[in-house]
Image: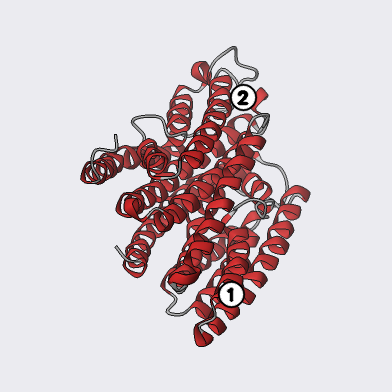
Amino acid sequence: MNVLASTDILQRTLLVLTSALFAANLAQSIMYLPVADEREPGDHMRHWRFYACMFAFFGAMLFAILAPSLTLMWVAVELTTLVSAPLIAYRRSRESLEAMWKYLLICSIGIGLALFGTMLVMHATTTGNATWHKAGFAFVLAGYGTKMGLAPFHTWLPDAHSEAPAPVSALLSGALLNCSFFAIVRVRAAIPPDAAAFCDWATAALGLLSVAVAAAFMVRQTDYKRLLAYSSVEHMGIIALIFACSGIFRDHQALLETALLAHIVSHSLAKTALFHTAGNLLLAFGTRAIAAVQGLGTTMRREAALWTVLVVLICGMPPSPLFLTELGLVFSSAPWIAATLLVLLFIVFAAMTRAALTMSMGRPAARPLPLPRRLAAVPSMLLGALVGGGAFATAAIVKSMIAKGGAL
């Protein structure tokens, strides 16, 4: 499959996925915000402003996916920054305002780099100079990689994801990061073959670095929402790595392109459900500290089951479709990439399961406030969609592996 064809398939997938995630987060917001306003002290954003920003955010993401040119796509990605920033500061606390301004500053710098890179790529297209293509893509990768959450440009992401209301965190992680990745894919599709190898190896290096940085910060993480934020950095790194390897190792291109789509969809569904569950825990306990949320299996069995199962799935343990997407990457890439990735994934798995077991087991550290049962409805449906959709993704990936000669 050529780059342009795979870009069209990715575009259609992101359109459906972004629309579904927006509907899920809108429904969760309607149920979540009244309880949050009641239990979280301080001055909150008016609900009509919140929903206006949510719809504008959704429209900007659709604009970014459907933009007919690289220039309009850049405008759309910048627009997503401007309309989503107020959502991060919903609580109007000192911490949330700081996170909002950090998000605006860092992402605006990144978008500036992306604009310069886009101009270089457009100039290179008219001159046919491969050096300008390489330079332009380097700036684009750094610029849109900032918005995508790739290390070392990810520093806005943990603060924004941890301070924003749960539905906003879910939309940022599950939908916005994908749109930024799609911007990189669009620019990569405009790169000629003589500059393609440099672009793919640069993307692979940044993807592997992102997984490594996320693993390092997750090991001793004490905040469960920041833990999920670093998990987003990890999975964006894996997505970048799968995409890059599909261009580097062309013998496995069909398998890796299938794995890429499956990984994007599976991560978005699982991470959205995890942020919703984390928001429910925050409403019940009033804290994001892992040490203060223990004994969920005794006090909040429904949330304990959701949290534990979703953490296991996001870590890529069977029957998660992420297991096969990561397995496909391991079998399709170079041995040194596969070995490094396996070590890092084991570290991530140990860090996340340790936090999940600490929160689900043991003696309760505090008595949680009761939660309306409806708050668990959306994450439960997303979990069902992940498991059901995972069966189709698994079948597609296994078929690709068998067609390639039985990589398993």
Residues under numbered marks 2 and 1 in contact, where contact means CB atoms less than 8 Å apart: no
Q: Position of residue 113 (x, y in %)?
A: 66, 70
Can the viewer see residue 59 in this picture?
no
Quadrant assignment for the N terminus: bottom left
Q: Image height check: is 280 above or below 121?
A: above
Q: CA distance from mark 2 to mark 1?
A: 53 Å
Kindly identify the amino acid type of the residue bearing the numbered disc 1.
Answer: Thr
Of marks 2 and 1, which one's residue comes earlier in the chain? 1
Q: Which residue is mark 1?
A: 131
Report which residue position mark 2 lands on.
293
- Which part of the image, by quadrant, shows the C terminus? top left
Q: Position of residue 160 (x, y in %)?
A: 65, 51
Residue 27: give its label. none
Q: Residues within 10 Å of mark 1 (few under 14, many from 20)?
A: some
Of marks 2 and 1, the one in the foreground: 1
State the residue in front, 313 or 260: 260
* Residue beneath the point at 50% across and 35% down: 339
- How many circles with numbers are drawn on the protein? 2
In the rendered structure, the answer to whether residue 257 lies left or right of residue 220 reads left
